DNA sequence: CGGACTTTTGAAGTAATTCAAGGGGAGTGG
DNA sequence: CCACTCCCCTTGAATTACTTCAAAAGTCCG
């Protein structure tokens, strides 16, 4: 079966004058969870099936409940994946950066998207339609096992959060949340490990299952103990060890 | 590549005198999430690669943290999958019945098992080693996409619970837990829908993120309102509609 | 420089846990 | 068959961890 090639270009069809971008996309796909280690000519083929999308800060890629029709890989920027309750409360599931997968509902054969994904800054992503993904998997079955790996990891991650939420008090939960953020989006700086994107007390609350007030009080306490320093939507963990101790210890 | 056939039989090598059992295994595999709709000759081949295990009530199939080495499908009986905290508290992830998959860590390429699985009664299951599963997937790639389906569904289920735990009060959480149990293991009876296996107040608490005391009080209240009737490790939901209303409604 | 958002911190309120005690059913072993 | 034990369930009362309410100060942006 022949694959149809869909032309696409970053920033509105600049590919014919700028092959560099396209080539760096391939490098990212090569490192991505889903397409890791595929030969470059295959990546080129896969890339050519994708369409490129830009998302301004605040743009919603898809809403919870939308038909699961498209698979995305982040090229650049940062996204937030969250569940929204009928009452309008938010539960943040995770943040996504370059190389990460979103919209895997279409991979898992689900009808609808389980979360709402929003761009947190000017970002870009590659998009594949459901039928194209199916084609790709038929041709390169390793993609399916890679997808299993990704979903398996995500599954373990929320399993851990479920356990935390069921059994631990808020302070430990917030500590765990911060540790996860530092691991996933930490940037080494002179003063410690900084969370690489703006994150508010409210966001932290929505990740830890608590309120912004409790987060604020807790961070203040930690700051006065020298565990971290923080400002408006900015957190630098100074003492990972002590923070880990808070996360693990009882009492 | 030739597949090696490993002889195995239910109840300790009875297969040569009892082909019926083997044949009914195939019917179950045919209905299972992982191998659904594969032709029977392929199922026979897959079945011949499995070894059969019996588990007495209380037997632990694998512990959280064990090497992820084996994939199981429940033939018969009932199992509980739970996370255990260092402090010894339990969080019940789900119950598993005939046809269901457990130990998918090995499918998802994970090092260790995320949960501890225990038999709740005399049960039996089929077991495949990691390398055998890999062989099967290489030969029949549809198994990998089926696995994606299963894990995707489990993921969504946990996601829903995470949201409930983050945003809802205990009463609604317990209601949701009961509704899920009724859906997954409900048996129609004259008086209503009965949970098909023994389940204690403590179990319900460990599924809902609360204590057995709160569960007991809540069930008592519901019982006096006619929503359900219950006894020692036994629950019959009499009024699903009202229970759904409790689960969905605020206030 | 106004306005919107973020953060901080106190005080009041409360949902749910913890503590405590007693009753009941099921299995075991004498 | 009874006594013993071990869970399971129930219900009150005390406690508490966290939320909610409230107000003010800080910070960014157009």
Image (cartoon, coloured by chain):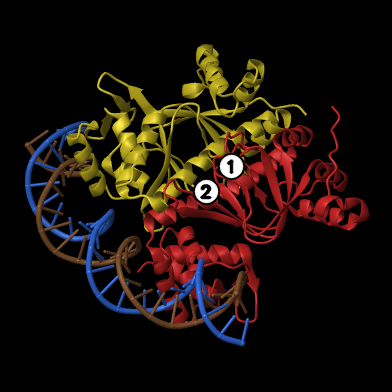
Chain colours: A yellow, B red, C brown, D blue
Q: Chain of mark 2?
A: A
Check if mark 1's residue and mark 2's residue have beta carbons within 8 Å: yes
Q: Give the image location of residue B19, x and y in percent.
A: 90, 54
The reply, left or right, for residue B179 in relation to residue B134 is left
Residue A87 shows in this picture: yes
Q: Give the image location of residue D22, x and y in percent.
A: 13, 58
Nearer to me, A87 or B6? B6
| Residue that appears at 66% across and 62% down | B121
| Residue that appears at 22% across and 34% down | A232
Q: Which residue is mark 1?
A: A69
The reply, left or right, for residue A229 in relation to residue B153 is left
- Kindly indicate the quadrant of the structure image that contains residue B111: top right
| Residue that appears at 34% across and 35% down | A244
Kind of element beneath mark 2: loop
* Residue A66 numbered tag: 2
> Which quarter of the rendered picture does the N terminus of chain B lie within?
top right
Mark 2, other Cα within 10 Å: few <14 / some 14–19 / many ≥20: few
The reply, left or right, for residue B84 in relation to residue C14 is right
Badge 1 and badge 2 both on one subunit: yes
- Kindly indicate the quadrant of the structure image that contains residue A8: top right
Q: Chain of mark 1?
A: A
């Amino acid at each position: 079966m022949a694959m149809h090639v869909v032309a696409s270009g970053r920033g509105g069809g600049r590919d014919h004058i700028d092959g560099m971008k396209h080539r760096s996309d391939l490098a990212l796909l090569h490192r991505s969870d889903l397409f890791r280690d595929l030969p470059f000519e295959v990546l080129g083929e896969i890339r050519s099936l994708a369409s490129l999308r830009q998302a301004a800060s605040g743009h919603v890629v898809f809403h919870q409940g939308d038909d699961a029709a498209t698979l995305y890989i982040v090229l650049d920027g940062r996204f937030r994946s969250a569940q929204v309750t009928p009452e309008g409360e938010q539960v943040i599931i995770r943040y996504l950066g370059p190389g990460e997968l979103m919209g895997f509902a279409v991979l898992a054969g689900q009808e609808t998207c389980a979360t709402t994904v929003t761009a947190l800054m000017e970002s870009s992503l590659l998009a594949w339609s459901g039928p194209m993904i199916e084609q790709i998997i038929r041709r390169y079955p390793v993609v399916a096992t890679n997808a299993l790996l990704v979903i398996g990891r995500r599954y373990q991650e929320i399993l851990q959060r479920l356990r935390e939420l069921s059994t631990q008090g808020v302070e430990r939960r917030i500590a765990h949340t911060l540790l996860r953020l530092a691991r996933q989006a930490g940037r080494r700086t002179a003063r410690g490990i900084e969370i690489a994107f703006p994150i508010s007390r409210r966001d932290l609350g929505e990740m830890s299952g608590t309120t912004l007030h409790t987060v604020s009080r807790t961070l203040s306490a930690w700051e006065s103990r020298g565990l971290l320093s923080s400002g408006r939507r900015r957190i630098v963990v100074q003492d990972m060890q002590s923070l880990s101790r808070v996360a693990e210890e009882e009492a």
